[in-house]
Image (cartoon, rainbow, N blue to C red):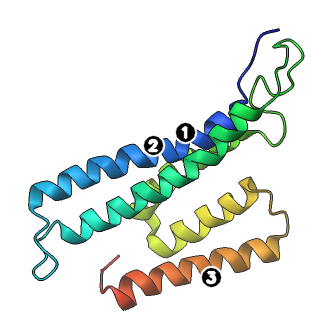
Amino acid sequence: MTRRPDWNQLAAAGVPLALMGGSAWAMWQAWGYGIGSLRMPGPGGYPFVLAAGLFVAAAGAVVTPLVRIARSPRQDAATDPRATGDAEGGGLTRAAMLVGVLLAWGLLFEVIGFVLASLICALAICWIGGQRSPIRALVFSSVLTASCYLLFVGVLGLPL
């Protein structure tokens, strides 16, 4: 019997690993600006702290899928329904669709603006995640978009 990995769990571990890599790069870049001290933080201090927090959170999130992979029973590759990664909810397909939505948001942001692009992409994410109630998806997307807008424009004072 050949042991086939659970592709859904590998995909679930891949996202936190990618976040760890990206946050490690961000910490390295922030270090180059100078992080300063607690009394007098430098221009890279706040980005370094945020990237370090993301790194730690992603490291914690990568543990669960790897433990599930290690504990999964041995199955024959020919009889394993998860060998394609599209059984039990389509892990790899959903991950690819989410990446597509993020890319679409980046393109739509320039054309139709933050609010509409975020609303459309949040609705798409709800659909990908299995939310079939249009009212719930619209409420969630609206609250998420309004919260992000208020955070960036109202609280942080960043123009979008």
Q: Give the residue drawn at x 55%, y 39%.
A: 14
Residue 139 visible in the shown view: yes
Question: Tags 2 and 1 in contact by the CB under 8 Å rule?
Answer: yes
Sooner in the amino-acid sequence: mark 2 or mark 3 = 2
Return the disc, 3 or 1, that comes first in the chain's sequence.
1
Q: How far apart are marks 3 and 1 (CA)?
A: 29 Å
* Nearer to us: label 3 or label 1: 1
**Mark 2 and mark 1: Cα distance apart in space:** 6 Å
| Label 2 Cα neighbours within 10 Å, binned few <14 / some 14-19 / many ≥20 | few
- Residue highlighted by disc 1: 14
- Name the amino acid, label 1: Gly
Q: Which of marks 2 and 3 is in front?
A: 2
> x and y percent of residue 6 in the render?
73, 30
Location of mark 2 (residue): 18
Residue 26 lies, with reference to residue 21, above or below; the image says below
> In the picture, residue 50 is in which quadrant?
bottom left
Looking at the rendered structure, the secondary structure element under dot 1 is helix
Where is residue 110, by image quadrant?
A: bottom left
Query: In 3D space, how far apart are the residues under numbered discs 2 and 3 (Cα atoms)?
Result: 28 Å
- x and y percent of residue 83 in the render? 77, 22
Q: Where is residue 22 in the image (x, y as percent from the top left)?
A: 36, 47
Q: In this view, does 56 lie above or below 49?
A: above
Q: Which one is nearer the viewer's eye here, 35 or 90?
A: 35
Asked if the residue under mark 3 is in contact with the one under mark 2, i.e. CB atoms within 8 Å, the reply is no
Contact, mark 3 vs mark 1 (Cβ under 8 Å): no
